[in-house]
Amino acid sequence: MADSSSGAHDSPTRESGMSAMAGVIGAILAVTAVLIATAALVSSKGGGTADEGSKPAAVAASAKTLEVELGDLFIRPDSLSVAPGTDVTISVTNHGGIPHDLSVKGGPKTPTLNPGEHANLKVGVVNGRVDLLCSIPGHAEAGMKAALAVSPTAGPAAASSTHKMTAEEMDKSYMDGVKAFPAKTKGQGNVDLQPKIENGVKVYDITAANIDWEVAPGDIRKGMAYNGMIPGPVIRANVGDKVKIVLHNKLDESTAMHFHGLVVPNSQDGVPGVTQPLVKPGETFTYEFTVKNSGSHMYHSHMNGALQIPSGLLGAFIVAGADEPKVAREELMILNDGPLGYTINGKGFPATAPIVAKQGERIRVRYMNEGLQIHPMHLHGIVQTVFAKDGYPIPQPYKADTVLVAPGERVDVLIEATDLGLWAFHCHILTHAESEAGMFGMVTVMIVQ
Ligand SMILES: [Cu+2]
């Protein structure tokens, strides 16, 4: 984000973004190093021996407390390391928006923790790998797994057994993140997909495959993508178009495609076992229909949906209407949460893209929520006019500064770039946007210049 000295008129350069980013990564590594150091033993002697009880505590198994954060469908850090023989307690806090627990596979677990709640999990003396997970059904499968490993090389213990960032560390981490914005990452979603025209039919080829996706600088996660991007390519069509969508499945599991919001014949609705067969790995399935209704719509997987969609099998399907509002530019804001974290258009802050407008311009934003949670999108300083919901015009458009977008919903707003400056633009469920280490996830900036 440009600071006051560089002014609001210039986007920061990639170079400054990257060097600032190195600071963020450095800070993260430093935090991790402290955590690992904290976890380590002064001496590995004595752990688990029979005469423990008669020895002073200092030479019995060293007791360590590790900090673990639960979020919505992740455990952070997901790999922990202690010296052999360490008596481990995990200090667990749920920073997510929904309940989670932390459970030792086949062993003890915390109570179910509501958002913001904390508990200590006594793991006991660790002499080998311990698998950790959230035991709430579906959460481990969606990514809430971690491993506690034994490492003889884990360094000497730090003075404190529990790491919490100092105020100075918090300030630095926060400012490093801000300075890095907008940070460069590999891969970009929402690229328009040009159809082939065959006998007057628009044909869109889409391949689903696994991908390593860089959500934020250095934060590379296992995702699933259409045509190698998250969100998938944007399909644009007009009412009356005959379209074919050819889905190639290069995943290692079955899939299918649903056209969310579009009026299609039942046979093209994309629900395996209900309207069509499974599209198994290696198979191709062709959808064919005439576009009947305009608006901001979506296409996404309709198989193992709680994992495939949050992992990235989603995209915008935009159908032009008869009387669209005249705007200088339109922007997509596809919201998602799950294995890729909290993202806007497949990226988390500081890798989110700013929305840039000249003063006086009118911008259209199409919000789409492909995640599992609601996201109230708040733009500082400038009002949003909500004029369409799920592709249908609202009879009485209304003004709001916070626009709630629930899973599956699309909301279209107009934003008049009235006031100059850098206006923060973020989800107002603050655990989707900020942590002790600074801003992350569903945060971007509207730049009015
Ligand atoms: Cu949110």
Image: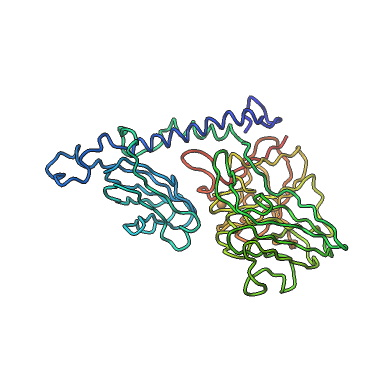
Q: Position of residue 224 (x, y in %)?
A: 60, 54
Q: Position of residue 101 (x, y in %)?
A: 40, 56
* Foreground pick, 341 / 396: 341
Q: Determine the image quadrant of residue 318.
A: bottom right
The colouring scheme, among rainbow, by chain, secondary structure or one colour, is rainbow
Residue extending furthest top? 5
Q: Is residue 286 above or below residue 437?
A: below
Residue at image position (70%, 35%) is 420
Q: Is residue 20 left or right of residue 145?
A: right
Quadrant placement of the N terminus: top right
* Foreground pick, 121 / 226: 226
* Foreground pick, 351 / 230: 230
Q: Position of residue 115 (x, y in %)?
A: 44, 54
Q: Determine the image quadrant of residue 162.
A: top left
Q: Position of residue 320 (x, y in %)?
A: 80, 57
Residue extending furthest left? 54
Quadrant placement of the C terminus: top right
Residue extending furthest right? 199
Q: Determine the image quadrant of residue 295.
A: bottom right
Q: Is residue 341 left or right of residue 182?
A: left
* Foreground pick, 256 / 445: 256
Q: Is residue 362 above or below residue 261?
A: above
Q: Is residue 57 left or right of residue 417?
A: left
Q: How many marks?
A: 0
Q: Is residue 436 left or right of residue 381?
A: left
